[in-house]
Amino acid sequence: MEFKFADRMDNFQEGIFTTLANIKKKRINENKPVFDLSVGTPDFVPEKHIMDALVKAAQVPENYKYALTDTDELIEAVKIWYKRRYRVDLESDQIMSLYGSQEGLSRIALTICNPGDTVLVPNPGYPVFAMGPMLNDAHIEYYELREDNNYVIDFKSIPEELAKKAKAIVVSYPANPICRVAPVSMYKELIEWAKKYNVIVLHDNAYSELVYDGKEGISFLSVDGAMDVGIEFNSLSKTYNLTGARISFAIGNSQIISQFKKLRSQIDYGIFLPIQKAAVAALLGPQTSVERNKQEYEDRRNALADGLASIGWKGVMSEGTMFAWAPLPDGYTDSQEFVLELINKAGVVCVPGSAFGSLGEGHVRFALVYPVEKMKLIVQAIKESGIIKK
Ligand SMILES: Cc1ncc(COP(=O)(O)O)c(C=O)c1O
């Protein structure tokens, strides 16, 4: 039988990640060293009180029923967390859970866009920002994040015609892959711009707790007027090392939340109750691990950035997220070619900037997923490979 699949399947190419995985596998089979700094999965473990809450709830037979909705306890926990952390007061109808921000971002455009409606997304940016709306048959236009503007949005550079046409804009800081944090002034401008052109703001705050150098991450919702124009995605994945548990929240404008809930009531019977219990334990329990993880990521960033600078690879940086963003070393211009050479010569796997959009070219992204001592070994491996041309 000849199957006829949807045209949209042509949008998905296996691309660089499959190539990287294959080369990695081959090196492992050949007993050659591999340092995988490509994927952003935290190597830290969840706190015991969170796992205990999950285990305890998993032993209650009642908890295996469809959850259908978020428990009151979970919604209250989010309210308390947002108030404590950002001084933001939330109402219950401004909060809903998701199976991770990835899932939310892949579906939210269904509630906002008719086929062909325009969504603005960052270039460079995290792939689901574009893929999600595309999957929902929206039309994607990119706004540029340029190094010479410190990678924050230059609203003047978005043509008026495009702003008038846009239904939504995806914004995300601390930003993956460019590892920058946005100032409050940018959010103020964003809100003004969104109101002027009637554009919904979708702010992804997946790395809200991973901001370095003594600074604190902020919530988009803590800026005046934000509730009028959009929602924020906030995830427990990186904050509490719960990536596999798949729980995050969409929070903000109650009209958008209520439409999204209506849509999801057709496809979703609620988050597994033991996961909801674990989330409550994470949000209301001791927060010491959050600070500890942040410090460890910062130390890793320093070990990598300072180590690479000392061998002639300058400019590796990160203000936040669990990644570092690096210009290609002198003598290289093609990020994909460079990444392949880096694996083959040093066994170090990272992601070419071009995988995040055309403006990512000329850079690579490292995930800060090894302890400081191993970061030093990685620097040594890169040094010994001779790939840095002095
Ligand atoms: C910017 C960004 N948003 C969202 C996600 C996905 O988060 P979640 O685990 O909540 O789906 C990631 C994961 O790497 C990410 O980097």
Image (tube, rainbow, N blue to C red):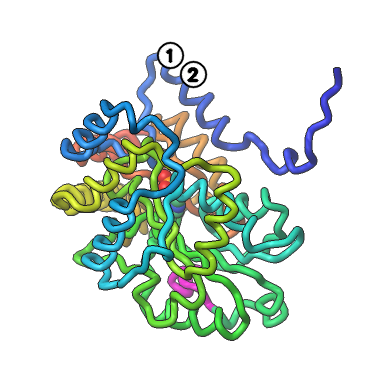
Question: Would you say the residues marked 1 and 2 are in contact, meaning their CB atoms lie under 8 Å apart?
Answer: yes
- Residue at the outermost front position: 62
**Residue 388 in sight here:** no
Residue hosting label 1: 30
Q: Amino acid at mark 1?
A: Glu
Picture residue at 36% right of the left edge, 75% below the top: 183
Where is residue 45? Give x, y as percent. 23, 35
Q: Is residue 110 left or right of residue 230?
A: right
Closer to us: 310 or 142 = 142
The answer to which image quadrant residue 388 occupies is top left
Asked whether residue 25 is drawn in magenta, I would say no
Crowd around label 2: few <14 · some 14–19 · many ≥20 (10 Å): few
Q: Bounds of the magenta span?
A: 145-154
What is the number of the mark on residue 303?
A: none
The answer to which image quadrant residue 317 occupies is bottom left
Picture residue at 72% right of the left edge, 60% below the top: 139
Crowd around label 1: few <14 · some 14–19 · many ≥20 (10 Å): few
Q: Is residue 113 left or right of residue 88?
A: right
Closer to us: 235 or 74 = 74
Residue hosting label 2: 26
Vertical relation: 228 (above or below) 289: below
Q: Amino acid at mark 2?
A: Lys
Vertical relation: 184 (above or below) 74: below
Picture residue at 34% right of the left edge, 33% below the top: 63
Vertical relation: 174 (above or below) 24: below
